Image: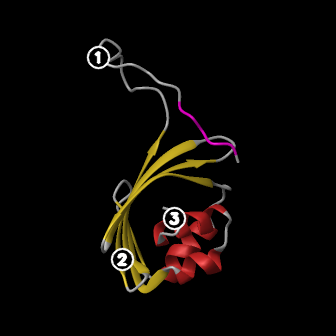
Amino acid sequence: MDDHIVADLWRAFDTRDWARALGLLADDFVADWPQTCERIRGADAFIAVNANHPARWRCHLQELIAAGERAISRVLLTNDVEVVHAISVYRLRDGQITEALEVFGDSGEPPYDRSRWTERYALRVPAG
């Protein structure tokens, strides 16, 4: 998993190595964020959106599934205040990422009492 382009991207984001991250994306890269109905066209714009985020996020790759020109990652994003879950689906071409569909979900309390059907578990946030 550590030598995969998607793992490299998350490592670059975690260390804020924007130049490295940019090199992993195709020039015609497109990302969709369906929860806010935003589309980001171009590798430069995608890096700028992330580099200019006001919070300092840490990226903890939890799982990566890759097959041919497709990959899926599950990442835990943390800062001093929040924990966010990210599920991303990627399309790859010629050693670069060409497309991403990223869905983000906040950690928190259930929206209503459904405890008779569910159980709560402790979220493990990696150190660092």
Between 49 and 5, the one lying in front of the other is: 5
Disc 2 residue crowd, few under 14, some 14–19, many 20+, Cα 10 Å: many
**Rendered image: mark on residue 10:** none
Residue under the image location 29 percent in, 16 percent down: 117
**Rendered image: mark on residue 7:** 3
59 horizontally vs 103: left or right: right
What amino acid type should be assigned to the residue bearing mark 2?
Answer: Leu
SS at mark 1 in the image: loop
Where is mark 2, residue-wise? 92
Pinpoint residue 85: horizontal percent, then vertical percent.
Answer: 47, 46
Measured in 3D between alpha carbons, the distance from the residue under mark 3 to the one under mark 1, in whole angstroms, is 35 Å
Pinpoint residue 27: horizontal percent, then vertical percent.
Answer: 45, 88
Measured in 3D between alpha carbons, the distance from the residue under mark 2 to the one under mark 3, in whole angstroms, is 13 Å
SS at mark 3 in the image: helix
62 horizontally vs 48: left or right: left
Which portion, as a residue range, is magenta? 123-127
SS at mark 2 in the image: strand
- Observer-side mark, 3 or 1, equals 3
Q: Is the magenta stretch mostly helix, strand or loop?
A: loop
Disc 3 residue crowd, few under 14, some 14–19, many 20+, Cα 10 Å: some
What amino acid type should be assigned to the residue bearing mark 1?
Answer: Trp
Where is mark 1, residue-wise? 117
Residue under the image location 61 percent in, 69 percent down: 12
Pinpoint residue 60: horizontal percent, then vertical percent.
Answer: 57, 51
**Rendered position, 29 above or below 100:** below
